[in-house]
Image (cartoon, grey):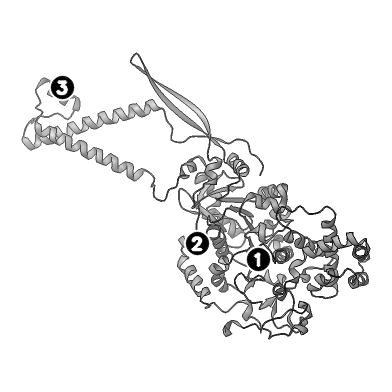
């Protein structure tokens, strides 16, 4: 995050303390005069005294002093009653006019130094609907971010914006950011996650919009492989092969592992060459791992030569003919990158049953078809041994790039109906190394992306510090929900929010003369400790071209659709979902014997039941 020039703001609500004192004294005096005058007038009428009572309070005071006007005990009682009534009215007025303290948090006092409602007009519903109408989406204001602290109105990111969310564990990122964004999607939707809650909460709702695809190679939601995707369909030339190899390299690297300066690039080049060879020869992607286990197997070299890739063929062949130590290092590095392919459970999702595409009656996922409709893709993986993160990344990139290709054919070079991408747990599940360089570009293509991290350092681990700063700067909106304890980053965020001038007033008496001394001191609007302890229900919003603001989070269970979503969760968990999922759009294959499925290298495939058979 780049530093910003100090932002100084004057503390609101401050006035000259002498003015406050004199105003209060005048109010008390005026109240006393009014009470005495009303009490005397009422008492005079009730007791038939003072028949010629003047209306001028000063003449009344003069008359009481001269004895021409009688002040009775009844007048005293009535004046006291009037005083009590006036005090009660003042107290009630203060309570009514003072902002409600209900649901207020300890951080809310900082909001008065940040953006006002007027400052946030560009994100409010009216202006957001105007922007959406220009983009051909008149009834879809945008992606919900949260609510204005003062008015409670929703604020939106437009369909051309790319967003970043930074939220520590258990601060409500799924309920307040992910789920509302999913439900707002007007067209195709892609979302990644490492937990089942997103699928459980929104799947039944998205079933009503189009076909639901759940990519679940690690069985996070116990989804059966009722459809499949061929990662090699992404590989069309040496460039796309290198990109796919890069996804395997990034997804397989442990956090903090910087890699080897020689073996990592060499292993990635070897993997890219083999991926290209497998794609050219219509092989299953699992053959790539088989090739990597046998350096003496050079059939991929012949495939590359026969398809006019002689230089890549030479590069692959040289890796197998070098010294044994160097060869083992390069092949071992490439095997580590492609390790997920040896997992038979993962293989069922990326290879056809029966050993051939023609023999597999499951539906094959096509990114190019997906981006043209209103379907939903949930792509799930978790960290650790056997992670499918490289394939989740590859599938995500394949879909986004398919959306970009489609956008280029549309008027203005952007998708008429946006392809919303929500990369939850982006640093763990979808390690897309090129994302910082492409982030703002996709917004202009009608592909709004929301990337969510648990911390700033998570992003740094994947994209490097320079890459994360670039991603942060490219985002149109950044939402921080709290829960982060990284002092350095919180200090930078505090600097972005800015300072305000705080007044300290002191009084002194000298020989009966009262003097007032006012001193100004500069204070942070929110310091690092306050940002680390940001209460749940509050978020910091940094939007391009607007003042920083504090907003209320808008969890789905407080929305108008809460009842429908709750019913959807219950129906999903009970298995009573709308029958529009990918598993019911095609006839499902029967059991295949291990020997009949060479694409899985002898792994056993269990029979798959249709949705109605369960």
Q: Nearer the viewer, mark 3 or mark 2?
A: 2
Q: Residue furthest top?
A: 511
Residue 66 occupies which quadrant of the picture?
top left
Q: Quadrant of the N terminus?
A: top right
Mark identifier at residue 4: none
Q: Position of residue 292 (x, y in %)?
A: 84, 68
Seen from the viewer's position, the closer of residues 491 and 407 is 491
Residue at 15%, 26% (x, y): give it. Answer: 60
Q: Nearer the viewer, mark 3 or mark 1?
A: 1
Q: Residues within 10 Å of mark 3 (few under 14, many from 20)?
A: few
Task: Report the residue marked by disc 2.
Answer: 556
Task: Report the residue marked by disc 1.
Answer: 381
Q: Nearer the viewer, mark 2 or mark 1?
A: 1
Q: Quadrant of the C terminus?
A: bottom right
| Distance (Cα) linking label 3 and label 1 | 90 Å
Seen from the viewer's position, the closer of residues 542 and 75 is 542
Residue at 63%, 42% (x, y): give it. Answer: 488
């Amino acid at each position: 995050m780049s530093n910003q020039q100090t932002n100084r703001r004057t503390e609101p609500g401050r006035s000259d303390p002498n003015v406050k004192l004199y105003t209060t004294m005048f109010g008390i005096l005026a109240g006393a005069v009014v009470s005495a005058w009303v009490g005397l007038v009422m008492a005079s009428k009730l007791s038939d005294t003072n028949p010629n009572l003047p209306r001028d309070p000063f003449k009344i005071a003069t008359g009481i002093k001269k004895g021409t006007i009688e002040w009775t005990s009844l007048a005293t009682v009535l004046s006291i009653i009037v005083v009590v009534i006036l005090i009660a009215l003042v107290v009630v007025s203060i309570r009514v006019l003072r902002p409600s303290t209900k649901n207020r948090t300890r951080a809310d006092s900082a909001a008065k130094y940040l953006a006002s409602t007027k400052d946030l007009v560009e994100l409010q519903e009216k202006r957001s609907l105007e922007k959406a109408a220009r983009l051909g989406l008149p009834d879809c204001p945008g992606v919900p971010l949260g609510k204005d602290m003062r008015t409670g109105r929703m604020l939106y990111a437009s369909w051309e914006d790319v967003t970043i969310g930074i939220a520590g564990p258990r601060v409500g990122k799924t309920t307040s950011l992910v789920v509302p964004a999913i439900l707002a999607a007007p067209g195709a939707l892609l979302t990644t996650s490492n937990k089942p809650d997103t699928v459980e909460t929104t799947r039944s709702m998205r079933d009503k919009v189009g076909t639901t695809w759940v990519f679940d190679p690690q069985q996070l939601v116990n989804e059966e492989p009722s459809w499949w995707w061929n990662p090699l369909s992404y590989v069309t030339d040496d460039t796309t092969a290198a990109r796919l190899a890069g996804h395997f390299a990034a997804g397989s690297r442990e956090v903090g592992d910087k890699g080897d300066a020689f073996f990592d690039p060499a292993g990635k080049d070897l993997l890219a060459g083999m991926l290209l060879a497998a794609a050219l020869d219509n092989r299953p992607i699992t053959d790539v791992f088989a090739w990597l286990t046998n350096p003496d197997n050079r059939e991929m070299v012949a495939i590359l030569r026969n398809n006019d890739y002689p230089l890549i063929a030479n590069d692959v062949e040289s890796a197998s003919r070098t010294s044994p130590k160097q060869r083992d290092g390069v092949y071992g590095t490439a095997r580590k990158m492609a390790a997920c392919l040896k997992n038979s459970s993962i293989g069922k999702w990326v290879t056809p049953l029966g050993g051939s595409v023609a023999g597999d009656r499951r539906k094959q996922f096509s990114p190019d078809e997906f981006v043209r409709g209103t379907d939903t893709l949930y792509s799930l993986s978790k960290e650790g041994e056997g992670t499918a993160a490289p394939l989740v990344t590859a599938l995500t990139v394949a879909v986004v790039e398919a959306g970009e290709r489609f956008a280029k054919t549309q008027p203005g070079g952007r998708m008429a109906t946006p392809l919303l991408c929500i990369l939850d747990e982006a640093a763990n599940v979808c390690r897309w190394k090129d994302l910082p360089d492409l982030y703002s570009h996709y917004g202009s293509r009608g592909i709004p992306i929301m990337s969510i991290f648990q911390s700033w350092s998570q992003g740094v681990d994947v994209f490097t510090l320079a890459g994360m700063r670039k991603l942060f700067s490219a985002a149109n909106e950044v939402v921080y929900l709290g829960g982060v304890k990284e002092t350095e980053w919180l200090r930078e965020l505090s600097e972005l929010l800015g300072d305000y001038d705080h007044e300290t007033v002191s009084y002194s008496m000298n020989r009966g003369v009262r003097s007032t001394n006012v001193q100004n001191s500069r204070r942070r609007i929110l310091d690092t400790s306050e940002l680390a302890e940001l209460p749940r229900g509050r978020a910091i919003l940094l939007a391009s071209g607007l003042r920083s603001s504090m907003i209320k989070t808008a969890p789905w269970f407080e929305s108008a659709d809460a009842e429908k979503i709750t019913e959807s969760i219950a129906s999903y968990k009970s298995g009573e979902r709308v029958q529009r999922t990918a598993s019911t759009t095609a006839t499902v294959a029967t059991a295949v014997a291990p020997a009949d499925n060479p694409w899985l290298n002898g792994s056993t495939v269990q029979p798959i039941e249709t949705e109605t058979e369960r």
